[in-house]
Image: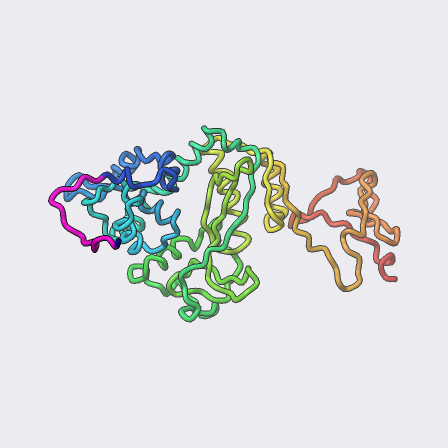
Amino acid sequence: MMGPRQEAQGSLFYEFSIEDHVPQDHLLRGIDRFVELSDIRRHLAPFYSSTGRPSVDPELMIRMLLIGYVMGIRSERRLCDEVHLNLAYRWFCRLDLTDPVPDHSTFSKNRHGRFRHSDLLRHLFETVVARCIEAGLASGQRFAADASLIQADANRQNSSPQRDWAPEKIIPDEAPRAVREYLDTLDDVAFGAASPVKPKFISHSDPASQWTGARGGPAYFAYSANYLIDTDNGVILDVEATRSIRQAEVGATRTMVDRVRERHDLNPERLIADTAYGSGPMLSWIVDQGIAPHIPVIEKSGRKDGTFERADFTFDAENDAYICPAGKELRQYRRAYTKPREPRPDKDGILRYRARKPDCDA
């Protein structure tokens, strides 16, 4: 028998508990067990006025941002709508059915203002890392470093070639926030803005982003998110944003290793990275830090013109000479000194071994 038509009838009173409507195996329940935000207010206290209207709870905004990250919600406007509608999201944010959800503009103002100036997100990140170390998830003995490309929100059509770009003509007070931040990093070698590498195009709206074709397809504007990872359990120990050029990514690795040592007292035994990090200065720095590099050396000695390559020569350590495939010697000094000279690099820091002209004429 067909039942009666279901019609919604408003009740005068309701007994409702969000706790009972969130499944025990929901992803956010698993995350909530490890979220500890009790010291946010103490960290942000100097950045709030002692007068005026009460602000939105900063812990609520951080919990909402966590939902956006975990659930892949990139739009702050949509995030607010989803928290308003979804019972599990309300439960995670400690909101009751009648509690209002912050306006999306509140997030933008806090992220670009109070959160940025107080370095709150860095503080939260390092708090999580410290808890991972306490739980034994990161030993700090074996590190790996790498960078990921993050596409910038910048249009190719709104850009200028390098030859037409004149930052000295920009009036900072009239420039957008992204342009002002770019001007602040012009001398920052670690970020990559002061690199001698000149990009082909520079974005008007986001000049700090780098024009790159690193992925092999069409080029676009991007940043590099650099990660330092403890390989025991894949825990990210540090992160640093730079322009998408090799020099900046290498510099970011130094910054992260130094910062992890300072903040968490971790001194790695080994550092793993790809060939992009295998330059001489970088390898020298790693060894000076007492770290064993597991990094392929950047090798540019290959020849395609039929001449000898570096690998064709063998080093005679006893006589301090290189032997070419024809059996001839290459030495630093040809003159017979009364007192033998010690190996000494040239002005550019390179030890050069030279052959005799008659040996190579043939």
Left or right: 60, with 185 as reference point: left
Determine whether, in the image, residue 326 is placed left or right of residue 169.
right
In magenta, the rendered stretch is 2-16
Q: Is residue 151 above or below residue 241?
A: below
Is residue 272 something one can see in this rendering?
yes
**In this rendering, position of residue 29 left or right of residue 46:** right
How many marks can you see? Answer: 0
Return the x and y of residue 336 as percentages of the image width and height.
84, 44
Q: Is residue 144 above or below residue 290?
A: below
Q: Nearer the viewer, residue 307 or 58?
A: 58
* Location of the C terminus (image quadrant): bottom right
| Percent coordinates x, y for residue 60 in the rendering | 27, 42
Residue lying farthest left? Answer: 12
**Which residue occupies the extreme front position in the image?**
1
- Magenta region includes residue 59: no
Would you say the magenta stretch is mainly helix, strand or loop? loop
- Colouring scheme, one of rainbow, by chain, secondary structure, one colour: rainbow
In-front residue for pair 226/193 = 226
The relative height of residue 33 versus residue 110 in the rendered view (above or below) is: above
User: Image quarter for residue 145?
Assistant: top right
Which residue is pictured at 59% across the width and 45% down the height?
Answer: 273
